[in-house]
Image (cartoon, coloured by chain):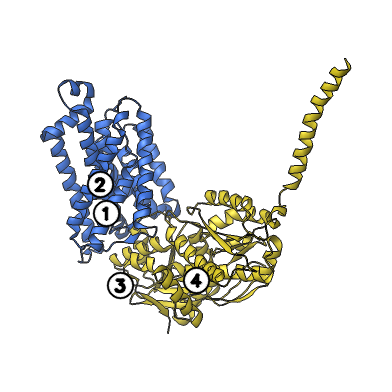
Amino acid sequence: MQVTLQTLVGGLSLGAIYALIAVGFSVVYRTMGLVNFAHADVAMIGAYAASTFYLTTHVSFVLAIIISIVVTGIIGLVIERVLRPLENKDFDLMLIGTIGFGTVLQAAATLIWGTTGRAMPSPISSGPLDIMGIRIRTYDLMVIAVTAACVVLLTLFLQRTKPGAAMQAVAMDHEAATAVGIHVGRSNALAFAIGAGIAALAGGLAGPMLYVDATLGSALGVKGFAAAMLGGFGSIPGAVVGGLAIGVLDSYAGDHFQGYSVLVTFLVFTVAIMIRPTGIFGERTVSRA
Amino acid sequence: MIPMRARSRHIVAAPAVALGVLLAASACSAPGDSSSDDADSSGPIKLAVVDAQSGQLASLGDWEAKGAKLAVEEWNKKGGIDGRKIELTVFDDQGDPTTGTNIARKLDSGNYVAMIGTAESAVTVAMAPILKQAEIPNITSGQATALVDVKSPFLFLNGPTSTTYDSTLADYLVTTKKFKKIAMISNNGSYGKGEHDAFTAALKEAGITPVTDQVVTTDQKDFSASLSRIRQAKPDAIFIGSEEVEAGLIVKQSRDLGITAPFAGAAPQGTPVFIDTAGATNAEGTIVSSPYLSNEISDASRAFATAYKAKYGKDAELHGAKAYDGTNIVLTALKNSGGATGKKLADEIRATKYAGLLGNFAYDETGVGIFRTTIGIIKNGKLSAAQ
């Protein structure tokens, strides 16, 4: 029982990070119908940026993350601006373009920060809570809280504000949106910037839990992508549920199948996707271009 | 009619000549033939370092390349070998066996005399058949017993095998510390699997069965389940068979779960990357079996560490020292044989007795030259000899 609960706690903590990654994927996808394959590498850049400001300039952890969100937000804008001429013309090239950007970001990280990577100490010094033998790290609780807050804010933004509503409109029908005077390009740019910002948040939060190096992106990206698929690509609540589900599934698979846990996790994932191709919350597929 | 016939004969003859040339050419480049290798005996001697310069194992590759470069620089300063300069090229295998085999072919066509690396046993094992055919001696930093199983006369190790590391470690835990309950956690990669098998065998010899034996994957990030099982088993010590970063995460998470037993492992657990990832306080007391505990073990190691620090501004560590030893052995063999290549060079390496940073190298038939490790313990974030 203790093992089962402890495994659940561990799975949920990492699941919260996967959820954030998945939310970022979904924000871009629901607006543009585009999977941003550079997303996970943007998260890696975010982790590096946050750790750099935190470790070398000794700003507070919160400030370091905010700076890294701004930095990666700008990267997101750059990616969108470069890809914009392809919008509504060649969708496949846009996809490949994002893959290319991912490779560029990885190479850039190796150039700037070297190959060795760095370990980031936890910003919270208090030890883990002990609830009837189940240990819960305070840092993990904070990660879960930040993820929850981020999702609530994002949902409010999309539903209650004008730019958010414009993004929704573009997602539904970009031609009609243009007809009523919405700037589609600007809306897409905003989606990319928000997606990149959330990626930086995920990467920055993952830093103290994991190890920051150029491969952090692929470590988070595959599970984050799977989480977005499982929840229903484009759905924000779906991304959260998918992320937590993948995290917990992975932990239990690790317990029961040891070295074969990855195989089992993705087998279960594949079966789930076969039964429900649109994911848990997915009701429509955006198709553009 | 007659001129016509003559012309047609010409037409037939031309392809026949071409075929003849082709046959002659292919006869020259039959597999295993290394005639082209001896062609160039006046230019620089070409050595290759093959190691991950990108990806998760990039730090290992970086250390290796630094050690090898330092050795080559010292030899070149002394005038090279018989007046010939030594030229060192670094190849990036990304820690990936497929990339490794492509590089092996490049080494063959590029007339490289010998290869230093790789640090990843799986890559070296994949490259070994091609290097054997091309007759390029290879000194690897891998330690898996799979390297010995390849049985290539061109493959040498620059350190002990897992068997040596782990039998020394098991002996210390069981005989010296009198630990009875030993738990194991290892990953299913080539290194982790090798460590798992070698340590299990060593424990069995000492008459001990591990209280729990957890296997994780190489890219796993959350170890709650495995560590909870280990916590339940209440071990005296936990053997860890995993690379630097993952081992660091395992130790960090285990302390968060309230596990206080010391960890025990081989070379990766003595590195700064491991200590940083785990956190110095969490890594405190980790028992390490290593052939190179610190830069302070001998005059040679102090000299090496000083030169390393002067060149790179960083502290030397085990992997750099291993590559430094390996490169020196190749260069010594080259010097003794007057710049031999291929099979001759491999035989010369096997015959070379070399007093290196890790100890006295004397190669046996299997390509292993050193059979000793010592036990160190991490104290105040630094590895030092036990007692």
Q: Quadrant of the C terminus of chain A?
A: top left
Query: In this figure, which residue is indicated by the disc labeled 1?
Result: A49
- Which chain's residue wears label 2? A
Callout 3, which amino acid?
Answer: Thr
| Mark-to-mark CA distance, 1 and 4 | 32 Å
Callout 1, which amino acid?
Answer: Ala
| Mark-to-mark CA distance, 4 and 2 | 39 Å
Query: In this figure, which residue is indicated by the disc labeled 2?
Result: A72
Q: Residue furthest bottom?
A: B387
- Which chain's residue wears label 4? B
How many labels were placed on the picture? 4
Residue A216: % across, % down: 35, 52
Q: Is residue A225 above or below residue A127?
A: above
Picture residue at 26% right of the left edge, 37% below the top: A26
Q: Quadrant of residue B313?
A: bottom left
- Which chain's residue wears label 3? B
User: Is residue B25 shown left or right of residue A140?
Assistant: right
Q: Secondary structure at mark 3?
A: helix
Instruction: Name the tint of chain B in the rendering.
Output: yellow
User: Is residue B211 shown left or right of residue A177?
Assistant: right
Residue B300: % across, % down: 51, 79
Instruction: Name the tint of chain A in the rendering.
Output: blue
Residues beneath discs 1 and 4 located on the same chain: no
Crowding at mark 3 (Cα within 10 Å: few <14, some 14-19, many 20+): some
